[in-house]
Image: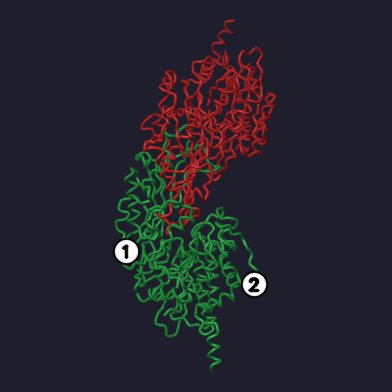
Chain colours: A green, B red
């Protein structure tokens, strides 16, 4: 008896009562190579939502991954053809009092392969670290532990096939270790989130009972810049605008006509310059006027979050920030206006001495609670009118050209949506916070809203539910840009976080 | 005797005393098909100066064309390899008191084939009219008169293989008709004018005696917008600048970092906007200060030139012009600042919700007499500094990024040069004016300077000679842009103009 007691005391603690986290870690360590093989196979399929054929290959592979895990997946389709389907599955837990829907998306942002360094977006490779820090391409040994600082470079390695992989692997680990979830679980993998989820509302409408849940738990986005885990209770709304200004109908020799015939690049530069001041504050009338002020809980959460701005500035190589000295977290709770890109004529080797015919910019408008995406676009249009432009939603005709000195075309892209925010003090909110905190020695960062956007209002309005986001990606994952990547440790952490959520009290 | 006299009176006038112009026209009408075949063969060879291999194929074909005309051509090379050669030839006229050098260039501006309508830049095609007016592709019959409104679409159809073709054909016609030139003629075809003539000065230095002439007569540029023929006594100087501004080192998610991390497109927009006011007047300090005012003769020539601005505005589809109401011809006598192109991130289908890392513009600075190209660039740099930028001539280092809130890179492109202008009352000037006037029923337009640029100072300073330009292309030739073309009548006129110059008193 004494010997047994001593033995128990002397044994390493885990053997006494191995936690769910430890069991999930055991599982991952035993299966790292096969899990990465499964993941890179998924990453190798091009996944731009408009690429109809390939997007279905992604859905088919995820179906296969779910079948192998004993789930019984099916596709949820929109009413029109060629829409990327939702891959859906369920796991019923006998006696569970709660149903959670776990969400990730398998489509990715469009990308120009020429911009990638060394490899292609859909040819996943391992690197010893971040490209920006000189991380070279490495080949994994067939067996043995893998350095968790390694990264996988591929489109959607983070955003958001990592979400799909983390959710499905957490489920595998629980099953393998005989751990019973505490909730009924619905799996929901969307295929056109990066296109603005144009059919999500319809698919929810067509499947309202199927998709009902006490909460949708969203697996998307990066952890805090400090590396600390996060729970995020809202996401900004988002909408995009294409803006084009018009000069002469044909390209003109810059010597023979320059500084007489208008230059569209100069026109657009003046127009864009007029939209923000030197501090980056948006000068469009009413821009900040209907943003809902943060409540006390939210303000405290922001104050408790680590201040990481100075380190971030150093890493990004910027000395100056926009926003007149306000912190990144404060600014994320304001609506924003970003130029995603602009173009007129050519630069570099193709540049010629011409006056281009048009200049185009793509604007990204982020919204916070209180903003309406159509109202915010209308403010942009009003601002352009105030600069003297006739604003059209189509190409100008000869009659337009004869009538108006300044012509602009403005088109809102499809799929804009508003911001959403869930109260932090709901029971489900507290359960999720506790679950994520159980996987972390550091205090988990709680954010009222993410800087990024998700079409949460499409969900919450239709299903009268709430959404809570649990991001896992490294913050420097180059999400939406070239050289997107995920750090393996973040993927490993993701398995443990999702297992904790599936087993939360 | 009486019968003979009556016969002479009754005969059409040309038979009595056919003019040189009429003989050249006869020659052209008899050889239209073979001339166009020769011309389109030349147009089919890609001719960007940096395309070393193809540029030599152009030179070789021009050599061949000159040999067939009984000229004895040779290549003038720079001292370094892979420089496009000058194709040179001479025709000595016994007893001539004057030597003229006739100049054209056979290289063309770089171009993006994707921007061309229907056909490719180096696949010459005939169209029934201008693309902008619905001109369809046509196939010529094997024989018979060709509609002179037809156009040839190809890179350098106007700028400036038309110059090469007009000069050589004028010579053929004179020879064929037994007409003796009145000057010794030196033929000089340059191969890197559109690259800024970086080796023209050296080639002149290496061949000073060979290239000495009483005047260089330049065949380049368009006729007046009204269709009236022109003689141009100067050309603006020209220099190009690459300008890049820098934001964070890596592309960032516009939601997570937007309106905190600086947006380079917005920075560049503000910077470019600061360089010109709403009227398009350049606001860079000192921009107009050292332009030499026009003399009395020049001002009268401008006043005599047709006012074509309103018709041009209608054709170009613009209601507003820059320059506060000043006419195009007035503004051409001022230095200009044009944005040839700008780019940051992507627009269109590739646009993503990112903050790009850089934004770039290519500027084109046109200069008038009195300006110095390096001084003008220095003014741009000083202006950028005044906006708070640290101006570099290279990529910023991490140390630069840590030290300076605003970073810009400015590089002047090679090959900038100053403006040049020849007095209109020199004997040679008067001879050229009379020669061109002899081919035209309408009054020839005389311009102190062209809006376009030619490296005339490289010639005049080294050879103590003068330059006079005789353009032939239609003004709507899309020079330097996609869909470059020449109207056949302009090419036909060019033959007659150059024959008149070769036989001028």
Is residue B22 visible to us here? no
The front one of B17 and A369 is A369
Q: Chain of mark 2?
A: A
The residues bearing labels 1 and 2 have C-alpha atoms spaced at a distance of: 50 Å
Q: Tag 2 or tag 1, which sits nearer the N-term?
A: 2
Where does residue B353 sit, x and y in percent of width and height? 45, 56
**Label placed on residue A486:** none
Is residue B465 visible to us here? yes
Q: Give the left or right position of residue A171, taking residue A396 as reference.
A: right
Q: Residue furthest top?
A: B1
The residue beneath circle 1 is A294
The residue beneath circle 2 is A143
Crowding near pointer 2: few (<14 within 10 Å), some, many (20+)? few
Asked which secondary structure carries label 1, the reply is: loop
Where does residue B267 sit, x and y in percent of width and height? 43, 47
Residue at the image point whose x is 39% and y is 61% from the top: A329
| Looking at the image, residue B37 lies above or below residue A365 | above
Where does residue B56 sit, x and y in percent of width and height? 66, 35
Residue at the image point whose x is 38% and y is 43% from the top: A407
Asked which secondary structure carries label 2, the reply is: loop
Where does residue B452 sit, x and y in percent of width and height? 50, 30
Q: Residue B435: which quarter of the image?
A: top right
| Looking at the image, residue B152 lies above or below residue A241 | above
Residue at the image point whose x is 42% and y is 85% from the top: A95
């Amino acid at each position: 008896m004494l010997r047994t007691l001593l033995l128990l005391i002397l044994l390493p603690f885990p053997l006494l009562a191995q936690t769910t986290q430890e069991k999930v870690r055991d599982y991952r360590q035993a299966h790292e190579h096969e899990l990465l093989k499964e993941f890179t196979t998924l990453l190798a399929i091009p996944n731009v939502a408009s690429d109809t054929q390939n997007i279905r290959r992604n859905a088919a592979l995820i179906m296969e991954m779910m079948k192998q895990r004993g789930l019984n997946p099916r596709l949820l389709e929109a009413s029109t053809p060629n829409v990327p389907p939702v891959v859906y599955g369920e796991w019923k837990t006998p006696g569970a009092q709660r149903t959670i829907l776990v969400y990730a998306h398998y489509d990715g942002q469009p990308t120009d392969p020429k911009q990638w360094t060394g490899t292609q977006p859909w040819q996943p490779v391992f690197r010893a670290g971040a490209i920006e820090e000189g991380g070279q391409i490495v080949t994994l040994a067939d067996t043995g532990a893998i350095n968790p600082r390694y990264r996988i470079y591929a489109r959607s390695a983070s955003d958001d096939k990592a979400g799909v992989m983390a959710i499905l692997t957490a489920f595998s680990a629980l099953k393998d270790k005989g751990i019973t979830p505490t909730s009924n679980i619905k799996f929901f993998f969307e295929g056109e989130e990066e296109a603005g989820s144009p059919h999500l509302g319809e698919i929810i409408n067509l499947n309202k009972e199927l998709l009902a849940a006490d909460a949708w738990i969203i697996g998307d986005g990066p952890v805090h810049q400090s590396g600390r885990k996060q729970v995020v209770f809202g996401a900004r709304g988002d909408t995009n605008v294409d803006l084009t200004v018009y000069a002469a109908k044909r390209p003109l020799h810059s010597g023979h006509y320059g500084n007489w015939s208008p230059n569209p690049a100069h026109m657009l530069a003046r127009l864009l310059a007029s939209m923000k001041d030197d501090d980056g504050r948006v000068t469009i009338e009413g821009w900040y006027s209907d943003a809902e002020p943060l409540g006390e809980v939210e303000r405290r959460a922001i104050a408790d979050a680590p201040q990481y701005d100075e380190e971030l500035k150093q890493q990004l190589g910027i000395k100056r920030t926009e926003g007149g000295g306000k912190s990144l977290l404060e600014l994320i709770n304001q609506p924003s206006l970003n130029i995603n890109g602009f173009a007129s004529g050519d630069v570099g080797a193709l540049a010629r001495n011409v006056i281009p015919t048009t200049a185009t910019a793509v604007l990204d408008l982020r919204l916070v609670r209180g903003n309406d995406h159509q109202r915010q676009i209308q403010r942009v249009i009003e601002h352009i009118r105030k600069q003297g432009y006739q604003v059209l939603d189509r190409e100008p005709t000869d009659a337009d050209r004869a009538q108006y000195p300044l012509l602009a075309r403005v088109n809102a892209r499809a799929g804009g949506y508003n911001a959403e925010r869930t109260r932090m003090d709901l029971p489900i909110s507290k359960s999720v916070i506790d679950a994520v905190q159980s996987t972390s020695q550091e205090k988990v960062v709680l954010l009222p809203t993410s800087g990024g956007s998700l079409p949460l209002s499409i969900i919450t309005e239709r299903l009268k539910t709430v959404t809570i986001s649990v991001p896992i990606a490294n913050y420097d994952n180059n999400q939406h840009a070239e050289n997107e990547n995920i750090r393996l440790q973040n993927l490993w952490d993701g398995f443990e976080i999702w297992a904790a959520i599936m087993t939360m009290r």
